[in-house]
Amino acid sequence: MKKRICIWLASVCCGLFTACAVITINVYFPEKAAKEAYKSLDDMMLKNPAASQEKQPAADQPAAPPETRPQSLLRRLPSISLVASAHAAEDVGDELAVEVAGMPEVTRAYEEMSRRLPALTALFNSGAVGLTNQGLVTVRDKSRVTPADEALLAAENSSRKVVVGAMARAILKITRQEDTRESRSQVLARAAATFAEARREAARPGWWVQGQNGRWLQK
């Protein structure tokens, strides 16, 4: 009798454990929409100061006429209510981008990343650093980096974590999922991997990137 009771209790515990595992695995993550949102945020908020100066017309030359191509929802953000846009957008990627762009900490993070962009690009070009499968920047050749470069990488990774964390919170909010420690942890991990994928696709030829399997390759 006692043996049967023990077997029954073990079966119940296994069933509960399996149910919990299923709940953890089934946290919804809109991967495609998140990737598009990251790309939209970079396109709108990540500015290269050096490139902007190169594009400015000389004093004795007339300015080029403005582009006439349609602007995206995000490029019109200053004149659109963020809350209204988020509710009106049919595409989840647009909703996510609008939600994340409206967070002050994300604005500050992108401003800081923009200032670091020229120096960071030079490090990528030299092969001194690479992009990890979590979207962070790591040293690959210590002989080519200085203490100042290492400080720059630490600051850059801190800014990137702010963006990824904001995306995880936005996903839970827009998909109406409960924001618990467990759900945020699951979504945060996938948000980081998706951020890395978006940055891998945007990486220039010759840059070192780490695949999801952990292997490094040069584009």
Image (cartoon, rainbow, N blue to C red):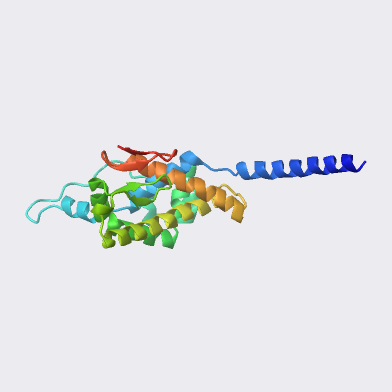
- Give coordinates of residue 43: x percent, y percent: 33, 47
Query: Going 41% across and 58% down the picture, which residue do you hit?
Result: 106
Tell which residue pokes out farthest to the front in this image: 3
Query: Along the line of sight, which residue is nearer the eye, 13 or 86?
Result: 13
Query: Going 28% across and 62% down the picture, which residue do you hit?
Result: 147
Number of on-image labels: 0
- Give coordinates of residue 71: x percent, y percent: 33, 45
Residue 48 in view: no
Query: Going 38% across and 50% down the picture, which residue do you hit?
Result: 41
Tell which residue pokes out farthest to the right in this image: 1
Query: Along the line of sight, which residue is nearer the eye, 131 or 140?
Result: 140
Query: Going 54% across and 48% down the picture, which residue do you hit?
Result: 187
Query: Along the line of sight, which residue is nearer the eye, 172 or 129?
Result: 129
Tell me the quarter of the picture where residue 115 sits.
bottom left
Residue 192 in view: yes
- Give coordinates of residue 123: x percent, y percent: 25, 51
- Give coordinates of residue 192: x percent, y percent: 46, 48
* Quarter placement of the N terminus: top right
Question: In the image, is 206 to the left or to the right of 78?
Answer: left
Query: Along the line of sight, which residue is nearer the eye, 196 or 151?
Result: 151
Question: In the image, is 166 to the left or to the right of 151?
Answer: right
* Quarter placement of the C terminus: top left
